[in-house]
Amino acid sequence: MEQYHSCFLLKEKSNPDIVLTDNLIMHFIELPKFTKSEGFASRIEKWLGYFKYENQGDFDMKTVFESIPELEKAHEKLKRFQQNDELLELYEARMKFQRDMATAKYEGEMRGMEKGLE
């Protein structure tokens, strides 16, 4: 079983035993590594289960919503967003713009490399 949740602290480079602060911890969640076999016992597992399995019939959303009201609120907001054609259009336009910018950047870098090699 691969670890889906990693936490990192800021430490002194020359002496890793010295931690700068316990108040800054970076959490990384790798959703593809999260599986149903992990269970949905903890709060984070319920959120991850929602993100990954919400559209699958065997995920019991009612039970999760009862234990985490904020998750039910987030779900309701997502449903409203998905039903709003104007917001969806804005979202899709932004995503297209970001893809176009990434493509333009990549193509510019390739042209620059070609010129550099010439």
Image (cartoon, rainbow, N blue to C red):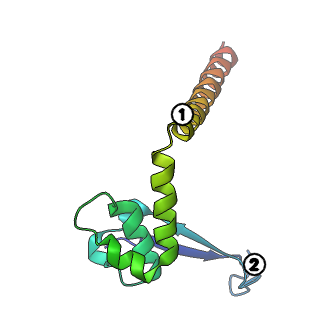
Distance of mark 2 from mark 1, alpha carbons?
A: 47 Å
- Look at the numbered disc 2 and give the secondary structure of its residue: loop
Number of the label disc, if any, that sits on residue 66: none
Q: How many marks?
A: 2
Residue 37 sits above or below residue 79 on the image: below
Residue placed furthest toward the left: 58
Picture quarter with the N terminus? bottom left
Q: Identify the residue at horizontal 49%, vertical 77% (top origin).
A: 69
Give whichever of 48, 108 is nearer the camera: 48
Q: Count residues near mark 1 (Cα–Cα under 10 Å), then give few for <14, some for 14-19, many for 20+.
A: few
The label shown at residue 12 is 2
Residue located 75% across and 78% down the image: 12
The image shows residue 87 at horizontal and vertical percentages of: 56, 40
Nearest the eye: 113 or 91: 91
In percent of width and height, residue 113 lies at: 64, 22
Identify the residue under disc 1.
89
Name the residue rendered at 31%, 57% in the picture. Answer: 55
Q: Quadrant of the C terminus?
A: top right
Q: Amino acid at mark 2?
A: Glu
Query: Residue at 33% across / 74% down in the picture?
Result: 62
**Residue 62 located left or right of residue 20:** left
Q: Residues within 10 Å of mark 2 (few under 14, many from 20)?
A: few
Q: Is residue 58 above or below residue 64?
A: above
Residue 67 is situated, as x and y percent measured from the top left of the image, at 42, 83
- Under mark 1, the amino acid is Glu
